[in-house]
Image (cartoon, grey):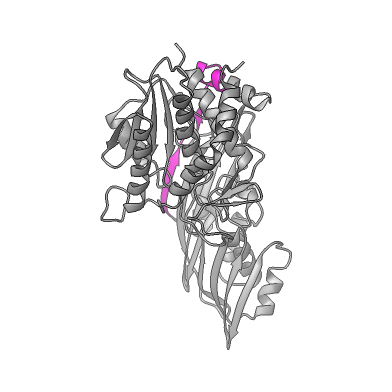
Amino acid sequence: MLEYKDAFEKYFDAHMDEIIKSLGEIISIQSVATLDSEVKPFGEGSAKALKWGENFLKSLGMKTLNVDGYAVHGDYKDGEPVLAVLSHLDTVPAGEGWSFDPFTLTQKDGNLYGRGTIDDKGPSVAVLYAIKAINDLKIPIGRNFRVVFGGFEEGGCEDIEYYQTKFAFPEMVFTPDGSFPVLNCEKGLVHLTFKGALETGEKRADYLKAGTVINAVPGKAEFTLENITDSELKAALNGLDGFKLETQQKDDILTGTLIGKSAHGSRPENGLNTATALAAAFARLGISGFDKLTQIFPHGDFSGKAMGMGFSDKVSGEMTCVLTQLAVDKTSLTAGIDIRFPIDKTSRQILDIICTELENAGFEVTSTEAMEPHYVDENTPLVQTLLKVYEGVSGQKGECIAEGGVTYVHNTKGAVAFGAEFPWENNNMHGADEHISLETFKANLNMYANAIVELTKQ
């Protein structure tokens, strides 16, 4: 039994308007982090978001510290912390296709819409109000805990790498940056870019751009084609359902936009990939270079089997391999790939396979980035306590799960993700109309309040 579960539920129900107002404040801060800014280290938006988080921590009576603009933390009481709750206040870019202003919190049909509502501003606000509830209800906390907000998670986690050169994490760390019940297994990650030459023929692509970031399925593509008609392109796209095509013909030049659906790179099944759709269509039209591309990245296949991979294991499940960026400028092609691989493989094994396949197809690899898989034994006290909290709040059986997403604790030994979404949900993370349901948001509040109490008991 969770001693304070009922008290927390009543508190959050009574204060929901206040909580949503605070969420609206942080959503309105456009905190897309960047290294290319006069405001160091991660730009004005990241700095403003971290300042907002620092001020809120101070309002809770916590002893705060801004760690050189990379992160801020707050300690609940004196003494070394036994627990750290780690989340981030930066976001990916807004992107295209929103039904609402991405930086104005919008409540509709039981959902809260806005960039960061699920990743990771909504969960961060839930953590803050979990602490406020502990304060207001005067619930005793036995040992100190620390909240850490970072400002560059989406850009590659340099924020936390720097933070850890200044402060060591305690033995117990969780992040509200993954999924419930407890995410103790995260697949490995490979990001890779490559390029190739395109021969000029009668039918050609003079311009193509699909994808803005390497870790998201591209939901929009713009193109310019020469000596190809609107009807020919529509015929080439026939059978690729769900896309919206807009074109304009002027003499021999066809310009247009293909609209699909963006999704997180680790969940390509939730998206409609405009890069692979147009690659397949251009190959059918006989445009040079795209036949090779679509052979190794068939539209609708996220497994990597076409390149001799398609790996899976019992713990982490199936791998994914997705073409997430594609650009053409008349005679050259550049592209990016997002791969999430099982814990029984290494990044070196994956890179050896894919680099060989790309080079055999005539492409040149231009950059690689990799992370090894992350796994925490489910029998640790941290995991077992979080599973207990999950069961107590949700009434459902708590089990450890594996996902392809790289959470904020991927490189932190012994740390796990606890929420913020449920595995059966599609919250459009990294896509248009990102949202969190009110029901899930309330679950976040209850989970984090009870987890902090249980993990800091004497």
Residue 154 visible: yes
Task: Identify the residue at image location x=60%, y=55%.
Answer: 297
Residue that sits furthest to the top in the current view: 458
For the C terminus, the image quarter is top left
Residue that sits furthest to the bottom in the current view: 251
Residue 183 visible: no
Task: Identify the residue at image location x=58%, y=74%.
Answer: 256
Q: Is residue 132 left or right of residue 397?
A: left
Tell me where residue 244 sits by quadrant: bottom right
For the N terminus, the image quarter is top right
Vertical side of 238 occupied by 247: above or below:
below
Residue nearest the viewer, comparing 202 with 47: 47
User: Residue 353: x percent and y percent?
Assistant: 52, 44
User: Residue 415: x percent and y percent?
Assistant: 46, 26
User: Residue 302: x percent and y percent?
Assistant: 62, 49
Vertical side of 384 occupied by 108: above or below:
below
Examine the structure image and report whether residue 368 is included in the region drawn in magenta.
yes
Count numbered badges in the picture. 0
What range is drawn magenta here?
Answer: 366-386
Residue that sits furthest to the right in the current view: 239
Task: Identify the residue at image location x=42%, y=29%.
Answer: 412
